[in-house]
Amino acid sequence: MNTETNILTDDDSWTMVIRPQRAWWDLRLMEVWNARELILLFVWRDLVSIYKQTVIGPLWYFLHPTLQTLMYFFIFGVIARLPTDGIPPLLFYLSGTILWALFSTTLSGVATTFIGNAYLYGKVYFHRLAIPISVVISNFVNFLIQSALLLIVMLIYNLAGFGIHPNRWLFLLPLLLLIIASLGLSSGIIISALTVRYRDLQHFIPIGVQFLLYATPIIYPLSAIPEGWRSVIQFNPLTPVVEAFRFGLLGQGSVNPPMLVYSIFFTIIVFFISLLAFNRAEGTFMDFV
Amino acid sequence: MSVVISVENVSKIYRLGSYDNRTLQEEIQRWWAGLRGRPDPVVTIDHMSQLEPDHEMLWALRNVSFEIKQGETVAVIGRNGAGKSTLLKILSRITLPSEGEIKIKGRISSLLEVGTGFHPELTGRENIYLNGSIMGMKRADISHKLDQIVEFSGVSQFIDTPVKRYSSGMYMRLAFSVAAHLDPDILIVDEVLAVGDLNFQRKSLGKMEEVAQSGRTVILVSHNLYTLKQFAQRAILLNSGKIELDDKAESVIAAYSGESPEAPKLIAEKIWAIEDTAPGNNIARLDRVVIKNQKNIPSTKLFSGENISVEIDTWNQIDSAKLSNTIVLYNEDGEIVFSTISNHDKKWHGQQRKIGLYRSICQIPANFLSPGLYGITVIICTNGYSDFFQADNVIRFEVTDSGDVRGDFIGGYSGIVRPLLEWKTFLVEPEKLTAGINK
């Protein structure tokens, strides 16, 4: 810190000082803010370009969760006959699918940040967090679009006489989504920082995400888990969030406030660890990629 | 003038031994090789030659210090692996230095490539925004300059077409056009000067000159020494990660091109001292081949503006032999530039020769070869054209641009040769003021 102030007084004002090591707390968040236009452009690029030159174009945003839901419905609902907590199965799977997509696509998108964007990072500098942040935002927009589908299906069920009653826990929704997105972002960042040196992790991502899917009450309700295993599943920080999401939105299931608080703390800690890992990796990762 | 870039004792070390492990497989390979006392299979040979004795560290840059003042145009030159790209990467913040400190004043843009981040599915217009933002322009800035960028690129007709439908020339023009409108205080450019067709090259070089003359600070890295000479006032010569020379551009470039050890070994003269190893047959054998400059001195460094001669000495071993010489000239891409036969020399061609040493001289005129590296293959025909022997690639030389052909043109030439040809222009018909052509 001393040298920093010396420089500023000795020779008038330098715009930028490049040194070998950055302090671990020096996240240069102002630079992230300055890159906001770029972040939004990346979001726009991802949303616009992904379904270009496809026949049904943006309809894919709806078709994807619909097909996934139908698949779960037949395999887990019709064939395996897993219970759904009294929620109509289609609604149960659809809500789980789009919430899980927010987490899993964020995680896998962010996890390839360094390696997948080496062509950009190797040619020009912009704050390296711009890309992970843009990935979270595009996945969030994706989630909002797909939520419209969920609302429509809920409305249809209500009109058909099934009572789907959101309750006051719905007000927690922004917090729940924030936790899910942050967990996806943080674990993705940690993996991306480690992948720079250990490519093996890259191959672990798909199977790891699949494992997490089965360890989270997405295709089954927590109540369907035998007592002994339930506490294990509950220590998955995603579990209380998914349960609260369904309870607030569809009026069935459970909320476990202490476990929610646990999730929040877990998220905050992982988030800070990820920032540190990222800060450590970003300075010289181009030497390894 | 104030200092806008200050580089102090900057070093960049690549640790090859323990940090570069990319996959478990490589790590295991390395461990296995280490057990058997073999060299590291993962480190590339290129790096091996520059390794420290402990075989662990590669100093891509070592204690590099310099200052650049506002408005200076500085060229960074040096061989491959001298540390140019590492220096550029550090100045562009792509990677951090291992030691030292760099201080920068003002908005800096680096052009290590044009069109970074172009998305093939997006239109030209959309890509201008995307690429401009990636390069650090503000959105409002881009909107403000959009018309200029489109006009400069010359692809306005296709500006709303996805760039994947562009020809590579159009793509490069659009990409360069965005780059040309960055307007930073400090510009770092790498090897992107000559893009696109000749016409656009002139345009882009003109733009570069404009930037350099507008008082901006420019750092330039390129292998095109001639272009560097045009733009740069000052040059920094890097060698094995250290600054070897930091001086006026002309003197550094002259020192560098005089040395140029990057080229394969150049040979001005080849003498076969031992008869048995000389190329030949029972009729004749080669004795000596030499290339000479205008002053008649054997030289591997020739200027495009001077006359060059190639001498071939052949021992004729039997009476009444009929000999002819052929020279085949290859350029560095292995293309044949020309081949020439000594069959127009009426005094000797087709005539019977007595035993003895004969010398044939071939003149290559000035202002004919383009700058570059060349190799000469000599073929001796001993009986008509059916019996022959040859010596491949015996002479290797380099032609440097002396600028005689260029005039005021500073761009790149296309074509294998660069002859200075005669041009004449005259007025065929004066404008008739009374005729209605222009109405």
Image (spheres, grey):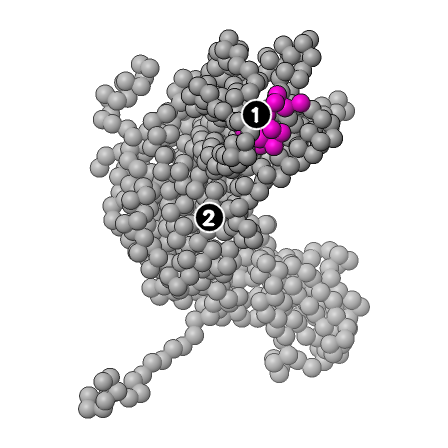
Position in image of residue A7 (x %, y %): 28, 21
Q: Secondary structure at mark 1?
A: helix
Q: Residue at x 69, y 68 (%)?
A: B379
Callout 1 amino acid: Ile
Q: Amino acid at mark 2?
A: Phe
Looking at the picture, tell me which residue is in the foreground, B168 or A89.
Answer: A89
* Magenta residues (range): A83-99
The quadrant the C terminus of chain B occupies is bottom left
Q: Mark 2 — on which chain does it sit?
A: B
Rendered position, A206 above or below A24: below
Farthest-out residue, front? A161
Residue B274 at least partly seen? yes
Q: Which residue is mark 1?
A: A191
Disc 2 is placed on an element classified as: loop
Q: Residue furthest right?
A: B282
At horizontal 54% and vertical 70% (from top left) the residue drawn is: B363
Q: Residue furthest left?
A: B434
Q: Residue A41, which numbered label? A: none
Q: Is residue B294 visible?
A: no
On the rendered structure, is B236 left or right of A93?
A: left
Real-space Cα separation, disc 2 to disc 1, in angstroms: 27 Å
- Residue A154 is left or right of residue B73, and the answer is right
Q: Nearer the viewer, residue B11 or B209?
A: B209
Residue in view at x 61 percent, y 32 percent: A90
Q: Quadrant of residue B421?
A: bottom left
Q: Which mark is residue B118?
A: 2
Is B432 on the left or on the right of B329, as rendered? left
